[in-house]
Amino acid sequence: MSALENQPDNLNYLSPLGFRFTMDRIPKCTYFLQGAEIPNISLGEYDESTPLAALPYPGDKLRFDPLTITFRVDEDLQNYLEINNWLQGLGFPESFQQYTNLINDRTRPTTQGQDANIYSDGGLILYTSSQNPNVLIKFKNLFPIGLSAITLASTESDVNYVEATAQFRYYVYNIELINK
C-alpha cells in the first residue's frame, strides 16, 4: 500500500462552533446552550507509577468522566430551575416526598419508562464545516450531579449575561457517524 492510499478522506478540522445538544428532560436549558464537552474516557485511574501487573486487561470496565454543559440563564430562571428541581428531587433535601414527586411527575411526555423522571437520554450532534449533521454522540441515562452558582455583580461595565454549568453522570456514551 502506497503512502497516497493512506491519506484521510476528509481533510477538514472539527470546528468547536458546530454542535447542538439535546436532552428531553431539559428543553429550555438546551435552547440556551453555549458549550458542551465530549467527556474523557479511560480504563480506570492509572498513571506512570502504576506497575505493569496492575494495568487493566481487555474487558476491564471503562471510566467515563461527567458530561459538562454551559448555558445562558434566562431571566425567569426557567432553564436553571429545570436542572435545580431535578437535583432537588434526586437529593430530597427537605423530605422524601420531593423524590416521590419527581418519580410521579406526569407533566412531561416521555418514552423512557418507569425511570423516565430520574434519567434522560441525550445527544450531542457535531456538524461538518458545511453545517451538516455529521456525528451523533448518544448519552444513555443521564442524571444531574452538579449545578454551578449564579454570580451577580453590579460592578460590571458591560452586560455579561449570566451563564451556568451543569454536570451529568450517565451509563455510557456511543459515537455514531450520521452520513457515512
Image (tube, rainbow, N blue to C red):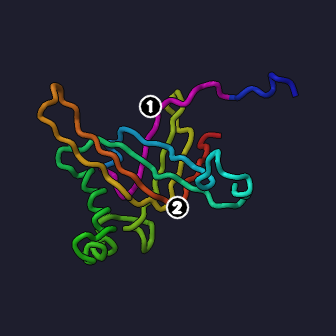
Whether 68 is drawn above or below 6: the answer is below
Q: How crowded is mark 1: few (under 14 residues within 10 Å), some or many (20 or more)?
A: few
**Image position, residue 163 (x, y; %):** 28, 41
Q: What stretch is highlighted in magenta?
A: 10-28
Whether 140 is drawn above or below 93: the answer is above
Q: What element carries label 1?
A: loop
To which quarter of the image does residue 128 belong? top right
- The span from disc 1 to disc 2 (Cα, nearest Å) is 27 Å
Q: What element carries label 2?
A: loop
Furthest residue to the left? 154
Magenta span contains residue 17: yes
**Image position, residue 69 (x, y; %):** 39, 45
- Residue at the disc numbered 1: 17
Q: Residues within 10 Å of mark 2 (few under 14, many from 20)?
A: few
Q: Is residue 38 left or right of residue 145?
A: right
Query: Between 163 and 9, which is closer to the camera in this rendering?
Result: 163
N-terminal of the pair, mark 1 or mark 2, is 1
Query: Between 154 and 126, which is closer to the camera in this rendering?
Result: 154
**Main secondary-structure element of the magenta-colored stretch:** loop
Numbered mark located on residue 78 in the image: none
Whether 138 is drawn above or below 132: the answer is below
Magenta span contains residue 152: no
Type of the residue with mark 2: Tyr
Numbered mark located on residue 171 in the image: 2
Instruction: Locate the N terminus by quadrant.
Output: top right
Furthest residue to the top? 4
- Marks 1 and 2: which is nearer the front? 2
Instruction: Locate the C terminus by quadrant.
Output: top right
- Taking the spot 15% from the left edge, 25% from the top edge, the residue there is 157
